[in-house]
Image (cartoon, rainbow, N blue to C red):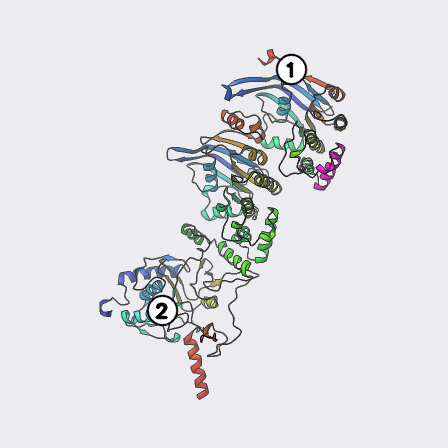
Amino acid sequence: MQERLRISGLDKTFTLHLQGGTVIPVMKDANLSVSEGECVALAGPSGAGKSSLLRMIYANYRANAGEILIREQDTMTNIVTADPRKIIELRRSTIGYVSQFLRVIPRVSAIDIVAEPAVVQGRAGDDARDAARALLARLNLPERLWALPPATFSGGEQQRVNIARGFLSSYDLLLLDEPTASLDAANRRVVMDMIGEKKAAGVAIVAIFHDEEVRDAIADRVVDVTDFTDAERVA
Amino acid sequence: MNKQHYNFAYLDEQTKRMIRRAILKGIAVPGYQVPFASREMPMPYGWGTGGVQVTAAVLGRDDVLKVIDQGSDDTTNAVAIRGFFKKTAGVETTTQTREATVIQTRHRIPEEPLKAHQILVYQVPIPEPLRFLEPRETETRKMHALSEYGLMHVKLYEDITRHGHIATTYAYPVQVDGHYVMDPSPTPKFDNPKMQRMAALQLFGAGREKRIYAIPPHTEVVSLDFDDHPFSIQQWDRPCELCGARDSYLDEIVLDDKGKRMFACSDTDHCERRQSAQGEARHG
Amino acid sequence: MVEGDMKHGPLLRVNRLTKFYGARTGCRDVSFELWPGEVLAIVGESGSGKTTLLSCLWGDLMPTAGSIEYRMRDGRMRDVMRLSEAERRLLMRTDWGFVRQNPADGLRMNVSAGANVGERLMAVGARHYGNIRSEASDWLGRVEIATDRIDDMPRQFSGGMRQRLQIARNLVTGPRLVFMDEPTGGLDVSVQARLLDLLRGLVADLSIAVVIVTHDLAVARLLSHRMLVMRGGVVVEEGLTDQVLDDPQAEYSQLLVSSILQA
């Protein structure tokens, strides 16, 4: 199994300048490897740094030290030190990130929000929109919402749009932050199936699940982030 | 006014030298507006103070002067300026185009083609063709220097948009010698083609705006236009009622209070010569 | 010398750009590269130097020190400040654009919408009225102005329409680099949203590189890939836009981010 993600010696602290320079340690010497077709679940109590780790893999948060190597075909790129253009390119081609909250764009319809990353990856617009419709239908998003901008959607509706957006494109590495949090049982089932299909297609997945039942059903491995955030290690 | 008390042609010789230098520079850079130290003249601005200063600077004792306003020799402005030079320079004056060596004009170019020994002096109210769209002098100068004339076409574009055709009929912009775009003074565009490769020297004087510019003889003078809206001149569907000319610029003349009108040549000398030639033909 | 290949080299390279107003600092040692299709936001409060920087880039101000290099259409990097005035002005009305905060500063208010859009075409020699008009009409459509408004004067337009007209007027010559100074400032929120969405689409479709100066972090987040945070004339932080906004490192960036009202 080819390694898709390798994290080693990763450190992260927040320095709060507005609070007298308080330094909040988040992570010390984190190490993680994820291979193709593998789903690794991050576990740990709230505030343990699960989301921070996902964000660092996506380069949304900066790391203070260490490496996050991401495979793109035959090369491994360290996203911690990659220049912004390279990061943007990796986000387009390789890394998908389904955050907890949808960042809506004024006036852009749900369909187009879902289709956009696939179009950026080179899929024809009409084809991508057809696929987006199919995916939104599968996620039971009422058809009357498809052409509307999701700003006024409920939390669960927005989340399904967000999931569809992340799953429609073909990324080698998917980062999922509580993808099933505000979904009902039926939709949770659909998302679990979709994750299973991505795994079968060889996608490497790092996910945070709020629901242990879902986590245990999907994850190949559970990594406890408190191992990286242990008081003694962080100190 | 006693002519004895004035220098020849009113202006002192130093002033004339200054104006001649401006004229020479204007000739050297065709279409370029040369600033000059315009003098107060014994007439109001707008009555041809620029043209008068240019005429005064080029006039010699042997010159024969003709002054026209709207093509006519006998309008107030023309009569006054002719009288002015008669008094201050004592030069011979004429109403006949072919006899004149210097012709000062407002609004028209004579119908009869001018010759190499003649000078045509235009009175110009607003010399800057870009002023309509660009109020900053620093910017218009830069635009002239760099031949950036897109704005002139913006003006013509607006014409077509509003009127369906280029509705500018007076002061129609021309490009001189492939560089400077110039306002040919408020002559009708009918006269623009006459400026092209004219044998006579053309001088332009703007007194209030303190600018002189020139077109040397035989210079390319092209009227701006669009490929699909080419430059064209006014046409009348009737001939001159006095001389029967079909190729001259016609004025509409109101004849009485009942609205009776007629169309006749605006160039009175041209019209009269044609009429007398026809009379001779009839009587001869 | 042609550096790299055209697609993958930087379009604009700013090196240690500095502007002093007497003893006062306008901006100091600002360096960045901008690549084709990349949107760079320069954020900061009034007096941060962002407007000085923009004015230097556009040539309204002469920098005290530093260089501005631009990749011309022939692939050569040229020092913009060493171009002849004719070259620079040609560059600015063909390959560059400038969208000003107040549309009245970027439009000719006394000529029609069509002529406003057509002006750049005429400036580079377009001489076919019909073609100019159809191109202008096409651009009005792209910025969502009804094409039957083509003969109306900008003063008859709302603020948002004027701003969209200004955008069309700039984009008609297919510029590769557009500067924007608070393009959504002074507009109603709903009008802002429409404009932002339009800009986002046009910039992406046409792959235009943009330097956008704004104090509005939401605008920066929506439009830009990268961001420079300026304060007191210097760049205090730079990076990917979402990185700077979500994990700001510098004290001033943290203050700026924490000052946003959450809707």
Q: Is residue B230 left or right of residue A40?
A: left
Q: State the extent of the magenta-drawn residues as a range.
A: A119-146
Percent of width and height locating residue B248: 47, 73
Residue C5 visible somewhere in the drawing: no
Q: Is residue B223 left or right of residue A127?
A: left
How far from the left and from the top, in percent, is residue A92? 65, 33
Which residue is the site of mark 1?
A226
Q: Amino acid at mark 2?
A: Asn
- Tell me where residue B105 sits by quadrant: bottom left
Q: How busy is the neighbourhood of tag 2: few (under 14 within 10 Å), some, or many (20 plus)?
A: some
Q: Mark 2 against mark 1, which lies toward the viewer? A: 2
Q: Position of residue B222 (x, y in %)?
A: 48, 63
Estimate the x, y position of residue B28 in percent, counting from the top left.
39, 60
Where's the C terminus of chain B, which quadrant? Answer: bottom left
Foreground residue among B160 and C84: B160
Q: Quadrant of the N terminus of chain B?
A: bottom left
Q: Does B177 lie within the magenta span? A: no
Q: Residue at label 2?
A: B77
Query: At numbered mark 1, what does the secondary structure look like: helix, strand or loop?
Result: helix
Relative height, residue C154 to residue B63 (above, below) = above
Q: Amino acid at mark 1?
A: Thr
Chain letter of mark 2 equals B
Q: Would you say residue B141 is visible in this rendering?
A: yes
